[in-house]
Amino acid sequence: MLDLNLIRENPDKVREALLKRMDEVDFTGLLQWDKERRELLVQVETLQNKRNTVSKEIAELKRKGENAEQYFAEMKELATAIKVLEEKLGRLEENIKVFIEKLPNVPDEDVLPGGKENNKIIREWGNKPEFTFAPKDHMDLVKLNNLIDYERGVKLGGNGFWVYKGYGAILEWALLNYFIEEHTKDGYEFILPPHILNYQCGLTAGQFPKFADEVFIVKGEGEEYSFMLPTSETALINLHRDEILKEENMPRKYFSYTPCYRVEAGSHRASERGMIRGHQFNKVEMFQYTKPEDSDRALEELIGKAERLVQGLGLHYRVTKLAAKDASASMAKTYDIEIWIPSMNDYKEVSSASNARDYQARRGMIRFKREGSKKTEYVNTLNASGLATSRLFPAIIETYQQEDGSIVVPEVLRKWIGKDRLTSDK
């Protein structure tokens, strides 16, 4: 959520920044509501003070045993006038709230405007795999080696679902173990959150109200419904909702494992069949709560951690800085780590590392207090996938395939899989 004071004091500056990711921005109505609201607050306060004065006069007359009846009509009129103004004030505050909640975050100054066409490649790591034979794609390889059952996935859940089986399930779990081990080493606290969340969780994360139709609703309607989490970021940002953290306990560093549930499975292009896009996939998510002055450093830490995980798997990747319209609406800055998938001849994102600044904290009233200060400040929140598996799996299968169709297991995963090569033999 944006700071209303910032919009009030610098409307042109905020508008120019938001136009990096919005087609149009008009604060005319908002500023008029805000002006009327502040005027009404003064009127209400004046009438309340007058009511308090009359109330004291009535009390004094009663103490003296005198008749205070002449003041009762005035008290009734004051109460009626205050109620009318408070109702009008409530409507204005609701208008302001709805308008502000729908605004995206202000992109950082160094974030380029526009969409994917303005994304900037920052660096690459490793080399694209080369083959001395005609390579297969992951769809053929997982069937050959009995790792994934797409047909039964569709039978159980419909399009966009699959079933891991045998060493396919073991490989998936090995990836999760690898991520968990590395994050634990780095001092992040492991969280297993609920998979069903309430509306306020989506609102705090910045996904609601605008993107409320992109989640699987479990029950209820309006602001009373529960939904399946689309990413564990939605849960982790709400751990400290409505709390005041101590400076001595910051930064707070968490990671979690959850499946992620998405209504929109994305493109239906033939090149994105299989596991590239789906309604359910596994992900380990990193999250930090920091002081404002520490969030830039925290973002670099999260990017570095995600990169090291991909490097450990020996996969070629690149880091891309996203333009404003290609990043999540809640984020001020985002970097994607994109791995190379040979059969697609393209890169696919496996981690987005983002800094929300105080946008989510304002929505969730997440603050901290510096030592020796009575004033509270909003924290900064950051997240990064560490990592999502549904694209890593195909990349590993294709990158490490052998001429006979078997797959060499990346060394970092072998202790969990118990073998160094996956074959069609059960």
Image (tube, rainbow, N blue to C red):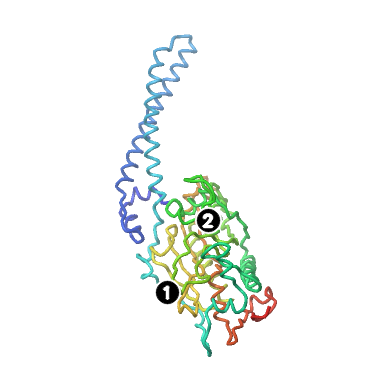
Q: Position of residue 149 (x, y in %)?
A: 59, 71
Report the residue marked by disc 1: 121
Q: Is residue 403 left or right of residue 96?
A: right
Labelled disc at residue 318: none
Q: Is residue 359 visible?
A: no
Please, what is the three-letter code of the amino acid marked with disc 1? Answer: Ile
Neighbour tally class for label 2: few under 14, some 14-19, many 20 plus, Cα within 10 Å: many
Q: Are marks 1 and 2 in contact (CB under 8 Å)?
A: no
Vertical arrangement, residue 39 with respect to residue 199, above or below: above
Q: Position of residue 25 (x, y in %)?
A: 32, 54
Q: Position of residue 413 (x, y in %)?
A: 64, 75
Report the residue marked by disc 2: 234
Q: Is residue 145 left or right of residue 79?
A: right
Q: Is residue 188 visible?
A: yes
Q: CA distance from mark 1 to mark 2?
A: 28 Å
Which label sits in the foreground, 1 or 2?
2
Please, what is the three-letter code of the amino acid marked with disc 2? Answer: Thr
